[in-house]
Amino acid sequence: MPKTVCLAILFVIILFTSCNKINNEKSLKTLSFSIAEKIPVPEPSGLALSSDERNFWVVSDENSKVYLIDSWGRVVKSFQVIGEDLEGIAVINNSVLAVVLERSREVVVLDTSGTEIKRAALGLEGELNNGLEGITYDPVGKKFYVLNEKKPRLLLTLDENLAELSRDTLNFSKDVSGIYFDTIDTTLWILSDESQSIYKTDLSGNVIEQFKIKITQPEGITLNKARTKLYIVSDKTESLYVFNLK
């Protein structure tokens, strides 16, 4: 092949690669928070809006407590969950919650007074500190979606009795730290602490859209029903961050 032809082909490849990189950078959106408010929860690691959207349910992995805080950041009530390393939380209805315990790889269902209803171990192995990180609930399909942080990064789908229906390996981020089920379009919003990103995915964990965020150690995510507000808690700063969505 003539040298001039080789150079021309090489130029086209470089140009195509550069254009793809520019387009990818343009398509990657950055979300900026409008409010950052300190909350009286040590090492908050899971977040959910209450059914009436007036309060927030938050879990602490420092003391394995569940907190209900109001929109001013004041504690309305709190209770202890038996187990270590409490991570994610989901609202099933106005009187029932579900949480995950990282080290024992358990899902615990309890009422809003702290009385345990049932629990199930998911039978996952791995390093103690790389276990379950998030949980969310589909009220129509009556399914739970649970995250395993890393080694491996997993999305597990459970039925209402906490039996595993499927598991998918996630390869889009360094870790996964929080999850929210979107009832409007039946998608998942998955948070990554180490990648400082939010990934909107389908129910098998295939990425639809990615958003970069500038928050240290984000570990809990939720949205309001109107999808005008997105909320994140940081384990490191012990703060609640509010994002305005268009």
Image (cartoon, grey):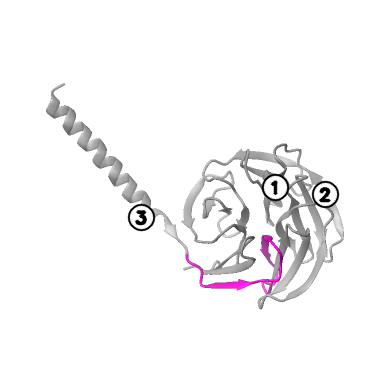
Q: Residue at x 71, y 58 (%)?
A: 89
Dot label at residue 119: 2
Describe residue 55's horizontal placement relative to residue 205 as left or right.
right
User: Residue type at mark 3?
Assistant: Lys
Q: Residue furthest top?
A: 1
Q: Is residue 99 magenta?
A: no
Describe residue 72's horizontal placement relative to residue 175 as left or right.
right
Q: Quadrant of the N terminus?
A: top left
Tag count in the figure?
3
The residue identified by callout 1 is 132
Q: Residue at x 75, y 67 (%)?
A: 67
Q: How far separated are the C-alphas under marks 1 and 3?
A: 33 Å
Please tell me which residue lies in front, 237 or 202. Answer: 237
Residue 85 image position (x, y, % from top left): 75, 52
Q: Is residue 129 above or below residue 113?
A: above
In magenta, the rendered stretch is 32-55
Residue 50 image position (x, y, % from top left): 70, 68
